[in-house]
Every structure is written in C-alpha cells, then in structure tokens.
Image: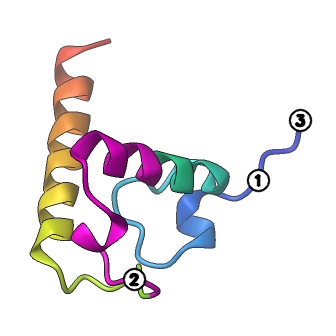
C-alpha cells in the first residue's frame, strides 16, 4: 500500500515527530492536548504552528525527546 508523506515532508518546522505519517500528526496533537487538559494555544501560536515563540513548545519538545531517548536506550 502506498504511504503518504511524513509530518516533516508536509508541515514546517517539525523537529521531533518527523517520521510520523502526516495524517497522524493532528490526532496525536489532539491526544496530547486532551491528556494535558490544555488547548493548542498552550504550546502554539494559533494559525502559526511552525513558530517557536512559546516556552511551553520548547519544553514539550524536550520532554518528547527525553521519552524517545529513554525508549531507545532502555527498551527493545
């Protein structure tokens, strides 16, 4: 089956979830907002999602990278 573009191919400034299928990025972000009990604007500037102006976005990226590192290092 043909696979669509990755998140990095379709969206600007994707740094952590680069290899995720682009069509899974929005549902993943919706999951994160629900889990944290926040809205998109907690981390993002609405309608300018590629901007890095908010500290919470940097923190979220650092936490995602930390989880990726732990998973790669400690789990097979």
State the residue lying farthest toward the top: 76
State the residue lying farthest toward the right: 1
Residue at x 87%, y 44% (from the top left corner): 2
Which residue is under mark 1?
4
Marks 3 and 2: in contact by CB < 8 Å?
A: no
Residue at x 17%, y 17% (from the top left corner): 74
Magenta region: which residues?
Answer: 29-47
Q: Is residue 5 left or right of residue 73?
A: right
As measured in the structure, the alpha-carbon distance from the residue carrying label 2 to the one carrying label 3 is 34 Å
Q: Secondary structure at mark 2?
A: loop
Which residue is under mark 3?
1
Q: Quadrant of the C terminus?
A: top left
Which residue is under mark 2?
46
**Location of residue 67 in the rendering, given as x and y in whole percent from the top left corner:** 20, 36
As drawn, 8 above or below 75: below
- Quick check: can you spot residue 64? yes
Q: Earlier in the sequence, mark 1 or mark 2?
A: 1
Q: Secondary structure at mark 1?
A: loop
Q: Residues within 10 Å of mark 2 (few under 14, many from 20)?
A: few
Residue at x 41%, y 79% (from the top left corner): 49
As measured in the structure, the alpha-carbon distance from the residue carrying label 1 to the one carrying label 3 is 10 Å
Res 7 → quadrant: bottom right
Q: Earlier in the sequence, mark 2 or mark 3?
A: 3
Q: Secondary structure at mark 3?
A: loop
- Quick check: can you spot residue 43? no
Circle 1 or circle 2, nearest the eye: 2
């Amino acid at each position: 089956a043909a696979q669509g573009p990755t998140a990095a191919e379709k969206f600007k400034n994707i740094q952590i979830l680069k290899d995720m299928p682009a069509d899974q990025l929005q549902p993943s972000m919706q999951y994160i907002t629900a889990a944290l009990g926040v809205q998109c604007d907690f981390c993002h500037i609405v309608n300018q999602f590629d901007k890095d102006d908010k500290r919470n976005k940097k923190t979220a990226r650092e936490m995602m990278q930390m989880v990726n590192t732990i998973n790669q290092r400690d789990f097979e």
